[in-house]
Image (tube, grey):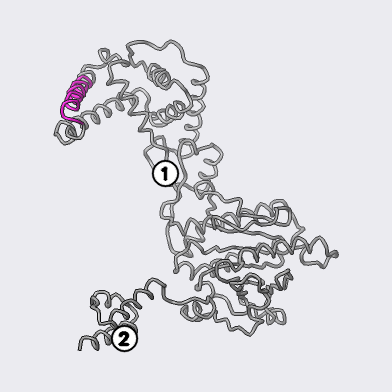
Amino acid sequence: MINSIHTKFGELQLVPSAVLQDASMNIYAADSMTLVVGPNGSGKSRSLYEIVSNVLSVNKSVEGKDNPYSKTQLVYYTPIPFPHVMPPEGEQFIDLSKRKKSVKEYQNFAVLNDIAGFFGFSPEVVFAFHPADYIQHHIAQFFSSGRWVDIKKLPEAFRQAIEDLQAKQKEAELQRKKIGYQAYRELPAYQDLLNTESEVEDRIASYLKERLGDEYGIKMLALLHTTKEHTKMNDMVQWFLQAMEVPFVRELKTLPKTAINAYRQALGKLQDIAKILDETDITTVTLLTEEQVKSLQKTGYASFGEIAIKGLSAGGAALLEQFSIIENALRERKSRQDKKFSNLLLLIDEGDVFLHLKWQQKYISFLNDYIRKIKERGRFTTIQVVLTTHSPVLMSDFPRDCIIQLSGDEQQGWAAFGAASNEEIVSFGAPLQTIIHQTGKAGTIGEFSVEFMRQIVGKLREGEAVKDYHIRMIDDPVIQSFVKRLKGTKEI
């Protein structure tokens, strides 16, 4: 275990002195849990860089089996979009900020269930095919345009419906030229045309479903996928329809084998997906099991649909990504049976950044439970965690001697701050207002509201009128009472 790290900016104490003297004083599942706080620009992310850099450099310069640096596996994660540059990855250092994956691409059901249970929501992992509406509309135009499908050879009722549509489309074109498009859209005839087009599309779909059977949807999707790659879209669609014996004015004689093979490959993948889902209806959203997710990942499903999590907020997605990626990295390293590193130093840079205050209250508790589970696996002898945050809520979960407080002046040494200094830090179990003021070094009221209230007071003192509504807006009872008394005095 690493007790402290010496850097050019000072010493970063990771293990409180009381815990060094008596390990039973530690209140966390981790062997040490440290929170780095400070204003923007104070160097919180840079402090994590210094930790990694110094562990790696000292490891090279210190020899001997008792060197704790050489036994420490470093893992760094951050959800922030513009992370601080970290040292190059290697066997000892894993930089997870470069390995972010969408929750649509990677699911860890164990982590998802843990997060859902702990934070109180009910997610569902589902698969949805991409819609095939575009190709269905395009095929409808093949039938209704009069230039492609020979409608005279279609069943009588089907032919008559298409001819009625063609007549209405011709009339609509004349009306648009006469009165303009916007004026035409306001006529009842416009809505009637839309209804007729929809009815004919339904007839065409039914006509094709009779020929394609249960695979109608996935074959449409395979066709759509292929037309995106094939330069002659109309030839591809005609080949597809001719294979179902749809009559054409002019028959297509040949189609490049590459296009045919591409269609068959796409259809094969879609058939594999449908088999996994036990569903060929592409309009159905399927609830997935973990085994189905793993099977889908082997098919290259992303071209034909997507895995999503219903009931998952942005905060839930951020937590799932964070702990799935950390968990995956630790299990990958474990699967290599690499026993070289017996200690884990986990660095999380603003892991709470996307969380609502209520979830920030639970974040450290969840992280503590997660660390406990890692320890129970017996992979690491010791586990240490260092976090950064701007949140006073997280600060309330750390005793003052587990907090490193940085100054706004980066030139000042880190050793001048924290529990070892004379500066008082208020944190563990303290009211948020006190933490914000004394530890966060900030006010508890936003600048906009402060300036607004100053203007109200200024107006009243100058004898100007102030609306009662603006006074009632003030939710601090002491300030509101003062303003009311001031207004009453000026009105007398």
Q: Secondary structure at mark 2?
A: helix
Where, quadrant-wise, is the C terminus in this rendering? bottom left
- For the residue pair 396 and 457, the one nearer the viewer reads as 457
- Residue 208 counted in the magenta span: no
Answer with left or right where residue 201 lies relative to residue 422.
left
Query: Given the current orientation, which residue lies at the most extreme right position?
Result: 64
Residue denoted by label 1: 286
Q: Secondary structure at mark 1?
A: strand
Q: Are marks 1 and 2 in contact (CB under 8 Å)?
A: no
Quadrant in the rendering for residue 366: bottom right
Residue 335 at x, y percent in the picture = 69, 51
| Residue found 51% across the figure and 70% down from its top | 391
| Residue found 63% across the figure and 78% down from its top | 418
Where, quadrant-wise, is the N terminus in this rendering? bottom right
| Residue found 67% across the figure and 67% down from its top | 383
Whole-angstrom CA distance, mark 1 to mark 2, is: 60 Å
Residue 229 at x, y percent in the picture = 48, 26
Query: Given the current orientation, which residue lies at the most extreme front position?
Result: 462
Residue range in magenta is 162-180
Quadrant in the rendering for residue 281: top left
- Residue 178 counted in the magenta span: yes
Residue denoted by label 2: 482
Q: Is residue 372 visible?
A: no
> Which tag, 1 or 2, sits closer to the chain's start?
1
The amino acid at mark 2 is Phe
Q: Which mark's residue is nearer the viewer, 1 or 2?
A: 2
The amino acid at mark 1 is Thr
